[in-house]
Each structure stands twice: as structure tokens, then as C-alpha cells.
Image (cartoon, rainbow, N blue to C red):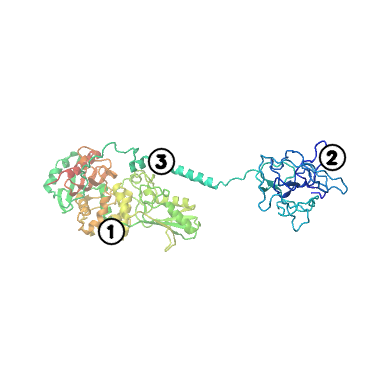
Amino acid sequence: MPSNDQPEWPSEDADVSAEEKPADGGATAQLPVPGEASLPESPTLFVPAPKPDAERTQVIDLRQEQETEPHQLPKPEPRPAQPQQPGPGPQPAARGEQSPGRPEQGAPPERPRPQPAPNPEAPQPAPHPERPQGEQPVPHPERPQGEQSQLGQPAAPNAERPRGPQPVPPAAAPLMQPMRIEPSGEIHPAEATTGEEKPPAEPAAKPKRRRKRVLITSALALLLVIAVGAALATPYVSNRLGLPWAPNLPKGDTPEPVPVALSLKAPSESAPQPTSAGVSAALAGPAASSALGTLTGAVIDPQTGELLWDRNSGQFRTPASTTKLLTTSAALLAMDPGTQLSTKVVQGASPDTAVIVAGGDITLSSLPAGQQSVYSGAAHLDDLVTQVKQASGGAIEKVQIDTSIWSGPLTAPGWAPDDAPIYTAAMTPVMLDGGLTDPTNDHSMRVAQPANTVLQTFAQRLGASAAGQAKAPQDAKVLGEVKSAPLSELIAHALEASDNTLADAIGRMTAIATGTEASFAGAAQATLSVLSQNGFDVSQVELSDNSGLSPQNSVPAKLLAQVLAVAAEPDGKDPRTAKLRPMLAGLPVAGGSGTLADRYNAANSRSGKGWVRAKTGTLSGVHTLAGVVLDEDGRVLVFALMSDGPDQDPARAALDVVAASLRGCGCR
């Protein structure tokens, strides 16, 4: 602020009438305070007044009664002039006028204006609690007499009011804080202005955390209610909880429990013992069917070992696929049921060469992990590829295959030229999906060269080239290995699906286990040797393969029945029973599974559905059926039937009737 500016006096009162106003404007620099005042003395403040081009200072009398605008002081109403004692010296300019600066010496003094009359309706400021009415403020002890109190600092209670002109703070003096006077008399700090109108300040935003928390909590509660409501509306939940809107809610009273008699019962040791006469009477009619041609067979009670029915059971006939009963029983007697077949990949003659070492697993799956072929639990070729890549660091460029574990011809004596690949595959010690062209269809054609297919597929997935046959180096580093399902599972599939390829592979497992050459001849010899060693009469039995596909096989029905009787013995006193029991689990169920799934639907054989479990065998002019049946008395009976009926379907149906007759006979 310029040093010659004078503080503006907030009053425009004059001590003369308008007509008598002197030439100097009649402004008063200091209004004298009468000895007797109607209002208590209040401190006087310096407040900067707005200026367009420079800072200005307003002198505000705290006796002012009312403030009308934030940055303007109201003009008091004029009242009749009262005689005042003129004060010496120059006076500050009236409020609202530009201060021209400090008057020079010798200038004519300005005449005082009259005091405005007090407004009786306006609120009066309360008298100072520490100063009696009419007492003048005392000057600050550290300031010269007559100096006004600073902004916001009340004058000393006992100081006398100066009579002369008051000094104006120099421009270099610190600015004083403006004060706002409320109508009630309260004083608050106010913002200084420069004459420019400021936009109203935006109200401070209130904290929204609490509101936000409430909204989030409400939203979560709503979502929870919706989720619970949706869950309760679902049929599964409403049914489980028995809610009124549940679809399965009973419409009436809960019925009384009804006694249930279970039809399926375990064999009973106390069941009535069948007799030979009873069985013969029951089978007399069914066994005489002309559709059977020449029928041979046997019925044995496994609990007693008694031969209850015998029709030329010692006569050697072509067994067809019932040969698999001999193959699987010999394997179970010679090996642990948990035995697995291994396929390895080892380091070849050079670091960039790998050799597939076939181990006899013909079930290796070509499908990706998670997909299953007809061979449940089969190992996956992709797993082997992954292992080799990791072990070799991707250095393999050439792949060879070693199939030396098996020997001899790829097909058996007696097979028709088209048996492989229609009914089986050329026997190699490693195959993908048993050589099937469709891994999910066990009736699909087989590939012509199963081992070569493995080599080509493995090399392609490994990113290497196939390099043909080779012998794996002795004690070579193993790069990968996968294993087949256990023997018991392989046997179950071979019997249920009558898988010829798998049955011949199992026969070669027996040959290797017994130290015999793994060929058709060696496997047949090993099978008969194991059976003979376990007490079965296999003299004069001839086997050309282990699948029964060869018509050169020759087996009596009695041998088949004896093997089944040992496997079905109820008390387990025979040590062979525990080993042979898994074979029964793989037998097809009449009208339910495997090669018997679509049979036993005729009226005269329907009684055997679900009760007969048997292995089937079919070749041209050969029809066989051998298995077990639970009769109506709860007794297990074992049977083996061999027919040479000319027509396949009538002969099969006639065999089904014979087995079903054992179910309902009682045979006493």
C-alpha cells in the first residue's frame, strides 16, 4: 500500500447539514467520543478495504451494529446532528472514497460529521466484560500514544481515546488480517479482498468413505440374498431341503414301507445239493435240440467237484474262443495278477539315436492323454514321447525298434489268410491300440504291420526319422518307459470282448514267464505245461494258438469244466482257486455284457438273463459256451457245452436254452 494512503473511516456521518457542508467534504478523521455514551466502547480495527489498483485499509468501528455484505459494511441511517468536539489535525477520508494521501501541514481541518443515531431494532453489542461503560481504551504500553490497535488486537481497557489524528501504518508494515463482525457482535477472521469479486468457494466435499462402505455392504447383502434365493429355487436344493416348492415334494402322506426281497443273493453253502438225476432231467429236452448238431458237454458242482451231467465230455472238439479259458487260467497260475508289460526307449548306438524296446504290450494307446481306447488303463504313446524328449534334451534325430522279445511267424497255423487283419493282427510285441484302425471300436480292422506303425508314429511325434529294426545295446541308458494295465485287467478284457490279439499276447507272457520261446508254438506249450503242473489233465490236448482262432485246437469239454470248477469253488480250500478267481470276473453276463450282451432275449432262455456268465466260442460249424450259473436254490453250477450245429444263430440260441435250464431246474 502506498505510504501516503490514509485509512478509510467507515462512517459517512457529518456534523452539519448538507447545505452547510464545507468545501473539504466535511469528513472527520476522528469522531470525538462524548463523555456519556449510550453504547459501550469497543475496540477499533484496521481492515484492508478493496482497491482496484492498490491495497487500502479500512478503519472499522466495532460499534458498527450490522454487516450486510461479506466485503461491504452497511451505511448507517443518518440521525440528527449532535454537537461534537472537533478534534485537531487531519481526518481520514470517509468510507467509500479514495484516500488522497496524508494531508500536508497547514491544510484546513475537516469538520466532523454528526454521529448516526443508534438503531433501536438492531442487536446491540454486549459491553466489554472487563471495562465499564464509557471508559476509554488505554493505549498499548509499547506503542506511542494515539496509535491504533492492530487488527484483531483489542485496545487496552483503560487507555484514553486519542484526540488527534492517528498515524497510518507505513506501506512496509505487515498487512493486518481482516476481521468479520457478525450481527451478534462476534468477531471472526475474514479474507482480505482487492476489490475483485471472487466466485463463491465450493463447499468442501464431505467424506464419502462411510457412505461408500454402506453402499458396498448393501450391494453384497443384496447379492447374497439373490444367490441364496436362486440356490433355493433350484430343484436339487429344494428337493434336498424339502422346501414347499420342491418338484419332488410328496403330494400326499408318506406311504408305509414295503418289505423288499432281494433277488440277487450270494451262493449258499447250505443250499440243497443238486443231483445227477435232477440235472439230467432238466437238460433232457434242451440238449436234444437238432440245432445243436452233435453236442458234448459237462455240468459240475464246484462245491463237491461232482460231475452232475456228462455227455461225451471227454471227446476232443474244436473249442474256438473257449480256448481263452485255458490261456488265461495258465497265465494266472504262472504270474502275479498285477504283472504289467513294459515298453521302453533306450539310447541307441549314437547319442542322436533312440531304440524302442518292445516288451509285449499290444495295448499302447495312440490317443491323447485323457482319452481312452477300448483297452482300459492302457499306457499312452505321448507319455513315452514326452519322457524321451526330456531325457535326451531333444537331441534324438533317428528312431529304431527292437522286437526281438518275440519270435516265430506272425500268424498261427490254421489261420485263414484273412483272419489277420479282420479278426486279429499279425503278432508283434508292440502295437498301438491292439492294431485297431479305430481305437474305440474293437470290431474294426487291424493294421497290417503293427510294429512298424508304432515306429513311424513315435518318430513323427518325436520329430525324428524312422530307421527300421535294430537290436538295443546291452545296458543302454533308458530314456523313457511306460507300462500296461495289470494282467488281471488284460484278462478281463480278453474274455469279455473275446479279443484274439490280446489272448495270444497273454499266451506269450506265459511263455516268457516260464522260460519258453515267445512264439505261437512256445506259448501253446507253456500254457499246457502250466495247466499240467497244476493238476489238470491236458494229455492229448492240442493248441496251435492261445486265442482259439485256429481250428486245429483240440480240447475236451471236461477240461474246460474242470478249470472253471476250481475257479468257482466256494470255500476256497483249493490253493488254485484264489489265483483263478479273477478269470470269473471277465466272463460275459447273459443279456448284459460282452459277447452275451445281445443274447438270452428269447422266451425259452430269458430266465438265464443276468444269472449265466460264460465264455463264448464261434467258428464255422463250431459253437461253444462254458461258464457258471446260479440256480434258484442258490447253488453255483459249472457247465461246458460244445456243438457243431450247421447254423450259427440257431445253434447259439439252443446253447442259451441249455444254460438257462440249469438256472431254473433246482435239480434235486
Using the image, determine if residue 394 lies above or below residue 222: below
The disc placed on residue 226 is: none
Q: Which residue lies under the disc numbered 2?
A: 22
User: Residue 290, located in which quarter of the rendered image?
Assistant: top left
Tell me which amino acid carries mark 1. Answer: Ala
Residue at numbered disc 1: 334
Q: Nearer the viewer, residue 374 or 444?
A: 374
Where does residue 548 sit, x and y in percent of width and height?
28, 49
Position of residue 19 in the picture relative to residue 546 (left or right): right
Per the model, the C-alpha gap separating discs 2 and 1 is 144 Å
Q: Nearer the viewer, mark 1 or mark 3?
A: 3
Q: Residues within 10 Å of mark 3 (few under 14, many from 20)?
A: few
Find residue 9 and report its image quarter. Answer: top right
Q: Does residue 588 show up?
A: yes
Closer to the chain start, of discs 1 and 3, is 3
Q: Nearer the viewer, mark 2 or mark 1?
A: 2
Q: Given contact means CB atoms under 8 Å apart, are the residues at marks 1 and 3 in contact?
A: no
Q: Residue furthest bottom?
A: 475
Q: Secondary structure at mark 1?
A: helix
Q: Which residue is mark 3?
A: 229
- Residue 353, given in percent of the width and then of the height, sits at 48, 58
Q: Residues within 10 Å of mark 2 (few under 14, many from 20)?
A: few
Q: Amino acid at mark 3?
A: Gly
Cα separation between marks 1 and 3: 63 Å
Q: Is residue 50 left or right of residue 567?
A: right
Sequence order check, earlier mark of 2 and 1: 2
Secondary structure of the residue carrying tag 3 is helix
- Nearest the viewer among 339 and 175 is 175
Mark 3 vs 2, N-terminal side: 2
The image position of residue 60, as x and y in percent, is 73, 46
Q: Which is closer to the viewer, label 3 or label 2?
A: 2
